[in-house]
Amino acid sequence: MSLQLNHKKISELVEQNYVYASVLYYFGIEFYNYSEKTLEAACKERSLNVQLVTDSLEKATTRGKDADPALISYPIDLIIAYLKHAHYLFVKKKLPYLAKVIAELDSTKCGYHQVVEDLQFVFPLFVEDFIHHIYEEEDNLFEYIATLDNNQKACGNLGKLYYSMEKFSIQRYAAEHEAHDDEMTGIRRITDNYQVLPNMHPHLRVVYAELQDFETSLITHARVENEILFPKALTLENQVRRKLQSLIPSN
């Protein structure tokens, strides 16, 4: 299969599988700048090991086929670690790639002038809001749950714990989180639910496919938080509250 990939044009590879576009991007081969070059020629120009690139392309075809771990059986600190890793992948890999391919859209080549204009205006705002939401979640929600977990495992700082429980509430976090669950409504509206029409330019096809894939990842991420993290955290919060109440009469 490697030889078959080597001699194909970049445009043909991306047409074959949109996931190839992101793999090539991480190697410094922007599919829209190298579209008429073969993979072998592009690798030579970038001084890349063509075998390494083709191996990565072949591995990419299995993306999304592995089942998520059975997180419901994991302790809460490992669930938070899992979610933080997902945040890292969103912020450091997925969003920069999406921002780049959207910024490089050229409506004179792709058509869909209004769609391109709207995406290039809205997506940076979405990214800014999304990253703010992630960091706020890590600094507040995850930190609060970690404080509860640490104090349940050991004594910890009871003063800090009491202050945190006066200030924060898992139930409130869950309600606020539900309000943020459909963050891509506007982008879905712009792209008509990522509908790919006949003869749509490959660059726009990649953008639509990547946006849809990102939304799928967000849905999975939200389900882990809503269906696993919050119920566990609420149980933990109640346990710690009862523990605190049992200590109050003795002080």
Image: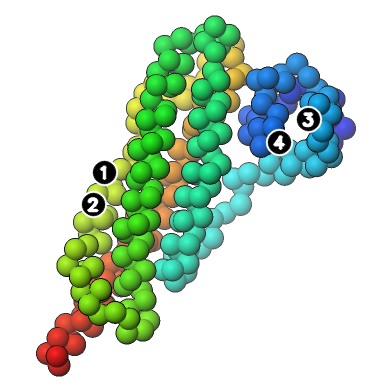
- Asked which quadrant contains residue 235, the reply is bottom left
Q: Given the image, on which type of amino acid does mark 2 rest?
A: Ala
Q: Is the residue marked by circle 1 packed among few (<14), some (14-19), or many (20+) residues within 10 Å?
A: few
Whole-angstrom CA distance, mark 1 to mark 3, is 45 Å
* Residue identifier under label 3: 46
Q: Earlier in the sequence, mark 4 or mark 1?
A: 4
Q: Earlier in the sequence, mark 2 or mark 3?
A: 3
Q: Is residue 41 above or below residue 84?
A: above
* Residue identifier under label 4: 27
Q: Nearer the viewer, mark 1 or mark 3?
A: 3
Judge left or right: residue 207 versus residue 34: left
* Residue identifier under label 2: 175
Q: Given the image, on which type of amino acid does mark 1 rest?
A: Ala
Q: Earlier in the sequence, mark 3 or mark 4?
A: 4
Discs 3, 4 touching: Cβ within 8 Å: yes
Q: Nearer the viewer, mark 3 or mark 4?
A: 3
Q: Is residue 178 above or below residue 124?
A: below
Of the pair 81 and 47, the residue shown nearer to us: 47
The x and y percentages for residue 11 are 71, 20
Discs 1, 3 touching: Cβ within 8 Å: no
Image quadrant where one finds the C terminus = bottom left
Whole-angstrom CA distance, mark 2 to mark 3, is 49 Å
Whole-angstrom CA distance, mark 3 to mark 4, is 9 Å
Image quadrant where one finds the N terminus = top right
* Residue identifier under label 1: 179
Whole-angstrom CA distance, mark 2 to mark 4, is 41 Å
Q: Nearer the viewer, mark 4 or mark 1?
A: 4
Discs 4, 1 touching: Cβ within 8 Å: no
- Residue 39 in sight: no
Q: Nearer the viewer, mark 2 or mark 4?
A: 4
Q: Residue at x 43, y 62 (%)?
A: 80
Q: Given the image, on which type of amino acid does mark 4 rest?
A: Phe
